[in-house]
Image (tube, rainbow, N blue to C red):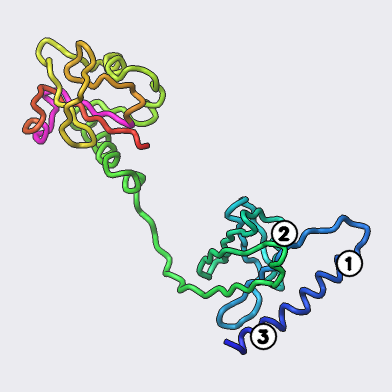
Amino acid sequence: MRILISRVARVLAPVLFALSTALAQDSTKAPTKIGRILGVFDTQSALPLEGVDVVDRIGGGTIRTGRAGLVGLGAFESQHDSSVVTIRKIGYADTTVLVMMGPVDTVPMQIFLRHVTALDSMIITATHAEHAPLYLRDFEQRSLNDTKVLGAKAFGPAEMRKNDGRKLYNFLLDKGIGAGQRCRTFGIYLNGAPYKPLIVAPGSPGIPDDDVDHYDAIVFYTGAQMPMEFRRTGGGCAALLLYARGK
């Protein structure tokens, strides 16, 4: 470790001297605030790393190291004379550190990045539904299959958001979903589980007295369309599946 630190010190010394000399000689330009110097090096070779992104986690700025592996943090924002930075470069493990940046913190700081093992390339075949929340995955599967096979009605997030601010029951009535002479009570499900709303919309077959804003998606089955799972648990002559909007 002593040998490693010694090698890094030999790299830092001439670069810091060159920086300070250049600033002192250029009196025609406004002084540049370099701030505390951060040097980024390879753990194994101790050589400086070029093209490393140093990201300001407080202010959001990014500075990239040059050939000498150095950056000045003067432009970064700080809180209580300290800044948090993330150092990242492809092929190396990301490192996040707290850097003291007060008036007395003038000693250059050294960061060593370690190599990470490169993984074999993979072909991704996942669909959008596989990355959605579990309850929305259920909706997407039903909207793809049951609307075609059974004739169920399905309304996704895009359609729901167009109707934000409206009452859910009024929205469903406009879509042709409401109480009829032969079906006065719906089986209501919220995110796949049987649901008994505390307040029911007046004149509705059990529909929650909520705004559309509460829900991300809906699937509706008439009595003839209902899968067997809802015939056993719903207690209604139709099934209305509600999928709550994520917070």
Circle 1 Cα neighbour tier, 10 Å, few/some/many (<14 / 14–19 / ≥20):
few
- Whether residue 87 sits left or right of residue 70 in the image: it is left
Cα distance between the residues tagged 2 and 3: 26 Å
Q: For the view shown, which residue lies furthest in the left direction?
A: 232
Q: Amino acid at mark 1?
A: Ala
When the figure is inspected, residue 77 is found, relative to residue 105, above or below; the finding is above
Question: Residue 12 at x, y = what percent?
Answer: 72, 77
Q: For the view shown, which residue lies furthest in the bottom direction?
A: 3
The residue tagged with tag 3: helix, strand or loop?
Answer: helix
Q: Is residue 219 magenta?
A: yes
Q: Amino acid at mark 2?
A: Gly
Circle 3 Cα neighbour tier, 10 Å, few/some/many (<14 / 14–19 / ≥20):
some
How many labels sit on residues?
3
| Residue hosting label 2 | 74
Labelled pair 1, 2 in contact (Cβ < 8 Å): no
Q: Which mark is residue 137?
A: none
When the figure is inspected, residue 2 is found, relative to residue 132, above or below; the finding is below
Q: Amino acid at mark 3?
A: Arg
First in residue order: circle 1 vs circle 2: 1
Quadrant of the rendering where the C terminus is positioned: top left
Question: Residue 137 at x, y = what percent?
Answer: 28, 42
| Residue hosting label 1 | 24
Give residue 15's quadrant in the image.
bottom right
First in residue order: circle 2 vs circle 3: 3
Quadrant of the rendering where the N terminus is positioned: bottom right
Question: Residue 127 at x, y = what percent?
Answer: 34, 47
Circle 2 Cα neighbour tier, 10 Å, few/some/many (<14 / 14–19 / ≥20):
some
Q: Is residue 109 magenta?
A: no
| Foreground pick, 110 / 191 | 110
- Whether residue 146 sits left or right of residue 25 in the image: it is left
| Residue hosting label 3 | 7
